[in-house]
Image (tube, grey):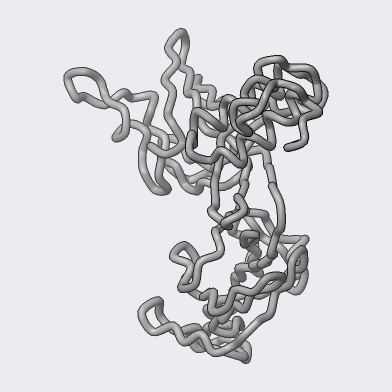
């Protein structure tokens, strides 16, 4: 089992790129990201409003600071709860989350007559989960292509600071600011930094003679019998065919083995899929793993 936290943003003013006039419905807000976390007692570092305080066979207990609105300024509407600073969070409210169920919580900020809200959905999952995301960004100008690994990019950074010429001078056409990074893409600003462009996995953008595109991949989340948590990046083409093509199934298993050679139980799951599709190498691997002959119908299966 592991915990999935999904995040949406919405706003009650129209100068933001995630404007919504219905702040009571997260489906009308802009989706930001899904994050997956192993079940470990303690505060969730990425979202410190939440703390896992109890782990049971089929449910968990999560404490949080209650949700509601923090109010600033003199023209605010009435608010229900003021959110403390990150150092003073008091997680006084408890939620029980059962396997394959979820709870929704929001936090908001109100200043004068504007208001923004962050919605969170916490879901307890049992079994593997996969999603389409991206792991590399390509920036092309005329005949030159520069690639950036996702882990090398951070919000509010400029690409011209991350990648420079050999003499350490700035590359002018990389004068691009990264605004936000999320599951399905990222947002950027060019030159004068006054207009936001959204780049998605299947939707590159072109501006000022520059093309920005993202390389898609599958992000796979797995856990073993001891509830150890694993995250994998899998080539999207082999993943889409791994349940019907022996070579693709074997490639997924080998990719998992390359990323976490110690996760034998998880590797065996995908080797079994490849074996069922007729991959001889998968059958040999399973025979070695179980310490038997290469017969699929031995007693250990």
Residue 64: x %, y % from top left: 56, 80
Q: In this view of the protein, which residue sits in the foreground, 271 or 195? A: 271
Quadrant of the rendered structure where residue 202 is?
Answer: top right
- Rendered location of residue 155, percent (x, y): 42, 48
Can residue 99 be seen here? The reply is yes
Residue 235 seen by the camera: no
Q: Is residue 44 left or right of residue 134?
A: left
Query: Residue 51: x and y, percent?
Result: 51, 75
Q: Position of residue 192 (x, y in %)?
A: 41, 40
40 horizontally vs 268: left or right: left
Against 144, residue 225 (above or below) is below
User: Splitting the image into 4 quarters, where does residue 228 fall?
Assistant: bottom right
The quarter of the image holding the N terminus is bottom right
Give the residue at the far left of this rendering: 167
Depth check: 55 or 159 in front? 55
* Number of numbered discs overlaid on the protein picture: 0
Residue shown at 56% from the left, 64% from the top: 39
Q: Residue at x 51, y 85 (%)?
A: 91
Viewer-nearest residue: 188 or 135? 135
Determine the image quadrant of residue 206: top right
Of residues 270 and 168, the one drawn nearer to the viewer in this rendering: 270
């Amino acid at each position: 089992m592991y915990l999935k936290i999904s995040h949406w943003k919405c706003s009650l003013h129209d100068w933001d790129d995630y404007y919504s006039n219905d702040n009571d419905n997260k489906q009308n807000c802009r989706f930001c990201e899904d994050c997956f976390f192993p079940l470990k007692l303690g505060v969730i570092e990425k979202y410190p409003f939440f703390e896992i305080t109890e782990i049971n066979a089929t449910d968990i207990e999560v404490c949080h600071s209650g949700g509601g609105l923090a109010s600033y300024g003199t023209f605010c509407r009435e608010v229900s709860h003021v959110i403390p600073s990150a150092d003073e969070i008091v997680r006084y409210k408890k939620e029980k989350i059962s396997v394959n169920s979820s709870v929704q919580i929001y936090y908001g900020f109100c200043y004068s007559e504007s208001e923004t809200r962050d919605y969170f959905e916490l879901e307890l999952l049992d079994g593997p989960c996969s999603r389409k995301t991206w792991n590399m960004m390509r920036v092309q100008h005329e005949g030159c292509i520069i690639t950036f690994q996702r882990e090398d990019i951070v919000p509010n950074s400029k690409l011209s600071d991350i990648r420079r010429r050999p003499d350490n001078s700035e590359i002018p056409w990389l004068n691009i600011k990264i605004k936000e990074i999320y599951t399905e893409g990222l947002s950027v600003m060019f030159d004068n930094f006054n207009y936001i462009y959204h780049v998605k996995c299947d939707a590159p953008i072109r501006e000022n003679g520059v093309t920005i595109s993202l390389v898609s991949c599958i992000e796979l989340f797995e856990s073993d019998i001891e509830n150890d948590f694993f995250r994998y990046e899998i080539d999207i083409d082999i993943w889409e065919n791994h349940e019907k093509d022996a070579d693709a199934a074997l490639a997924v298993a080998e990719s998992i083995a390359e990323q976490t050679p110690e996760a034998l139980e998880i590797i065996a799951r995908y080797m079994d899929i490849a074996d069922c599709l007729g991959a001889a190498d998968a059958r040999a691997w399973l025979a070695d793993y179980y310490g038997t002959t290469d017969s699929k119908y031995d007693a250990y299966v």
